[in-house]
Amino acid sequence: MIPIANPQIETAEHEAVADVLDSGMLADGPEVRAFEEEFADLCGVDHAVATGNGTMALHAALEALGLGEGDRVLTTPFSFISSANAIQLVGAEPVFADVHPHTYNLDPDSVREVLETERVDAVLVVHLYGLPADLDALVDIADDHDVPLVEDAAQAHGATGDGERVGAIGDVGCFSFYPTKNMTTGEGGMITTDDKEIAKRAASFANHGRSQEGGSYEHVRLGHNFRMNSIAAALGRVQLERLSEFNERRRENAAALTDGLESTSVTTPVEPEGRTHVYHQYTIRYEDRDGLQEHLKEHGVGSGVYYPICIHEQPAYDHVSDDAPVAERVSREVLSLPVHPNVDEDDIETIVDAVRSYTEGER
């Protein structure tokens, strides 16, 4: 079976983790600070704050922006549920706009329509599958309405929009280092920003509300233990060195899949001009998605549906009455194929042949 994901862990990662274990400094410490600095450099921002996972990064970032009870945050209904959960976890209310039918990211026209008819206090955009959203338009919209823009870049490490790294374009960015992501720390997250005060408040919230200037037991706000540990940071520092290699391999595999699936009836991913897709997922659309997925399984090809239920249709969001027809249709048709760096030419041929053998029959 060709797996849908396959984390790249080699000798250097093992050695880095072993060095931390041998040092005895396992919790938050110098290794984490070094990882924060290096990740900030990658994104081209002044500050980065490491967290225990990507949801923690989103939660701490929203807290750092001062969002809470009574606030309303616009986001996408087509994403992993943590994007919207973080909004509710700070006490705010999620508001959904619809997505673009080709990019699956927030549609700026839908965002603009919501902001012109409803009160919204912030916008949280997701760079889904590794493709940057239309940040030129979304930044302008957020500026026009004087609301902060949060980037959920959990799937887009190293992606760019008009030459700028995601995580550096909005007011604050958030990343995840879950094992299936383009780089991993096992579990982990990162907040990125050029705003010193946002970084300071996020770091404090992630560390029990401790003061950054006072002693270890001076707590100036409520907070959580959202810290990253040094084992995760050591793994992340090695992975970060290999990120460009990982992304290039994903892009090569994506190009080969697109070439192989040309002239079929599946809809392949797009890469709008000025944006660099890093293919956390290679996601196609096909009306008989479930039949195709079963056929692929029978032919030794793993696949995944990200995501089969829109967030506003989840039981946990019964109280939200939003309507997003494009997202609802997309959720019934998307299917992700293996694109990770361990996919080789033979795998590409197997994947393409399996897709073609089903779709060319137009079942």
Image: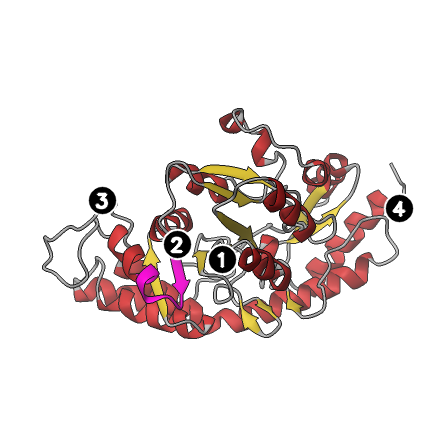
**Amino acid type of disc 1?**
Pro
Q: Which mark is residue 186?
A: 2
Query: Tell me, what colour scheme is on the image?
Result: secondary structure
Which of discs 1 and 3 lies nearer the camera? The answer is: 3
Residue at 37% from the left image edge and 66% from the top image edge: 195
Residue 182 coordinates in the image, percent (x, y)? 52, 60
SS under mark 3: loop
Which of discs 2 and 3 lies nearer the camera? The answer is: 3
Q: Is residue 14 visible?
A: no
Task: First in sequence, mark 3 or 4: give its number.
Answer: 3
**Amino acid type of disc 3?**
Leu
Residue at 33% from the left image edge and 55% from the top image edge: 51
Measured Cα–Cα span from mark 1 to mark 2: 9 Å
The residues colored magenta run: 186-199
Residue occupied by mark 1: 7
* Looking at the image, residue 149 lies above or below residue 111: below
Residue 24 found in image quarter: bottom left
Residue occupied by mark 4: 360
* Looking at the image, residue 124 lies above or below residue 44: above
Residue 327 coordinates in the image, percent (x, y)? 68, 40
Q: Is residue 152 left or right of residue 331?
A: left
Measured Cα–Cα span from mark 1 to mark 3: 36 Å
Q: Which mark is residue 342?
A: none
Question: Is 161 included in the stretch rendered in magenta?
Answer: no
Residue occupied by mark 3: 222
Task: First in sequence, mark 2 or 3: give its number.
Answer: 2
SS under mark 4: loop
Nearer to me, 211 or 233: 211
Measured Cα–Cα span from mark 1 to mark 4: 32 Å
Residue at 61% from the left image edge and 32% from the top image edge: 322
Measured Cα–Cα span from mark 2 to mark 3: 27 Å
Task: First in sequence, mark 1 or 3: give its number.
Answer: 1
